[in-house]
Image: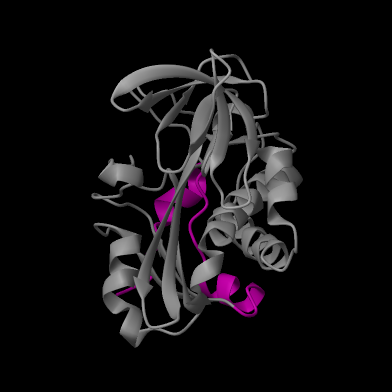
Amino acid sequence: MFTYFNYNLVMSNIIPYAQTYLNTKLESWHVHTIFNDIPSTNTYLKEQTHKLDDRTIILANQQHSGRGRYQRQFKSLRDKGIYCSFLMKNYDTQALTQLSFACAIALAITIHELYQLKVQIKWPNDLLLNTKKLAGILIETMHQAETMDVVIGFGLNVYHQDFDDLNATSLEDVYSSRIDRNHFIVHFFKVFDTVIKTEDILMHYRKWMVPSGKVISTSINGIKTLVMILDIQNDGALLVKKEDGTELSLFNEEIQILSNL
């Protein structure tokens, strides 16, 4: 385990991580390791949970087996994004959905406050910028009797890169000034700590989610179906309406936005 610093990056738009700076500014959080290359920051935290303290953060300059929901690969090119996972131990099992939503909200608020960019959350917790994917979140749990340890990972596209045929974008594609990942991380965790103390997480989630009235595509019983977003429910399910007026609750289904944001 080591902190990676590439002085060649200083001459580019890419600002390297500074672990001492981060741990000075983060207060109640701690950056345990910044990896040069790692299969997955989430996997590492899951495997090392018993050795690590609550509120431990892992960062990586590159992941070669980064993943999202349904074990889909998340493109994690070297020094092109923020690949971050953090550990919360002994968490209330009833609050998992709110914790996941809080991460998405905190990312959205941080991006807006630092760069004046308005992103939207595609349920449950992808971030879209100009209809393109900007960030993804993966939350995993290790259950105990009445509590659980939670690993939350997020990948954020920061610097310009070739996304091939993916419908994705980066902050640098739309923000002209230099972006410092260290400032982003410090700001994010301060916002996150505020959001998780908020009584009505869903109220804040509604402000940032792809709004009601938007048409999405989903698969119901193996059949591709067009539905319209109505609301987010207390249990975190997405309430939608089919063309015939039937209302449905989506829990783990994959969705695709069809209408313009």
Instruction: Say whether residue 77 is visible.
Output: no
Q: Which corner quadrant holds the N terminus?
A: bottom left
Where residue 108 appears, as percent x and y from the top left, is 65, 45
Q: As drawn, is 208 to the left or to the right of 229? A: right
Where residue 180 appears, as percent x and y from the top left, is 59, 51
Q: Is residue 190 above or below residue 211?
A: below
Determine the residue positioned at 36% across, 18% down: 224
Q: Is residue 124 above or below residue 129?
A: below
Q: Which corner quadrant holds the C terminus?
A: top right
**8 in magenta:** yes
Where residue 43 appears, as percent x and y from the top left, is 28, 63
Front one among 107 and 202: 202
Q: How many marks?
A: 0
Picture quarter containing residue 182? bottom right
Q: Is residue 108 above or below residue 144?
A: above
Q: Is residue 78 above or below residue 89?
A: above
Instruction: Say whether residue 145 is visible.
Output: yes
- Residues shaded magenta: 1-28
Front one among 102 and 175: 102
**59 in magenta:** no
Where residue 130 appears, as percent x and y from the top left, is 60, 23
